Amino acid sequence: MKQLDWQNLLEKLSQASDEDAVEAAKLLSQQYHEQSILSLIQFARSKQPPHRRELALYALAWMHNPQFVDTFIQILGDLSEVENVRGQAAEALGMLFDQNSGQIYYHKAESALLEHVSDLSPVVRFWCCYGLGNMRSHRAVEQLKAIQAQDHVLCPGWWYVSKEAEDALARIVGQGNNDPTLANLATFAEEDRVLAELGMSDYTAMLEQED
């Protein structure tokens, strides 16, 4: 898309109806040029309404780019952030990898999800369970078993955290499908392709330099 096109999409993400904002987020997830991505990251960390920032994270998640790990971890770990935005960040982390990854990004994402799977928010716990299951995290098995046995709190709009922990355990041992969002894990070849298109840019570092 031309530069003007993604700028218009970003404006829709901010100002359009909820339905049009969702469509804008889907289109923005297909934009791999640097300025569009930087703008999405800035949007996700801005003072925009929470449900619009969730959409920005959604768009970034569907790019399947491990370079976004630090951004997602920062938002997940921000206890002043609303729970749905933090939950979206947890979901985004879980969409990046599977258990065969030897990359440092995988371990950073896994460690963040393990830290917050016991969060006070059931939304955050639910999506951390999802993320750990989608990543096939064997380090998470004991915590997920405990959550399955004890955490019978409902995640608004979904189901019990204990049920999501059960589903996550099934995915880790190779049973069941990937989950309610039908998120497709990127293959390593696809990750390499995206990273090559992006020139291996570290967008979080870029934003910190701009600040």
Image (tube, rainbow, N blue to C red):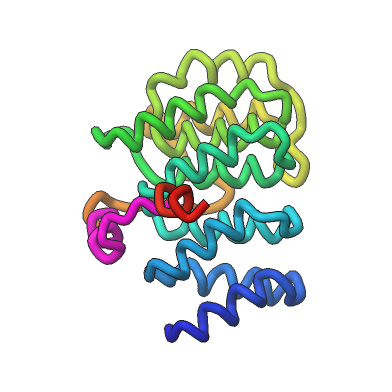
What residue is rendered at 49% in x and 45% in y?
A: 71
Quadrant of the image containing the N terminus: bottom left
User: Is residue 201 part of the magenta span, yes or no?
Assistant: yes
Q: Does the magenta stretch include residue 58?
A: no
Rendered location of residue 181, percent (x, y): 56, 52
Rendered residue at 27%/66% (across/down): 197
Front-most of residues 33 and 107:
33
In percent of width and height, residue 72 lies at 51, 43
Point out the stretch of residues depicted in magenta: 191-203
Instruction: Give the percent coordinates (x, y) of residue 34.
Output: 39, 67
Which of these two is toward me, 120 or 33?
Answer: 33
Q: What is the tally of numbered marks visible in this picture?
A: 0
| x 47%, y 32%: residue | 132
Instruction: Give the overall secondary structure of the magenta segment.
Output: helix
Q: Is residue 149 visible?
A: yes
- Decide if residue 184 is in sight here: no
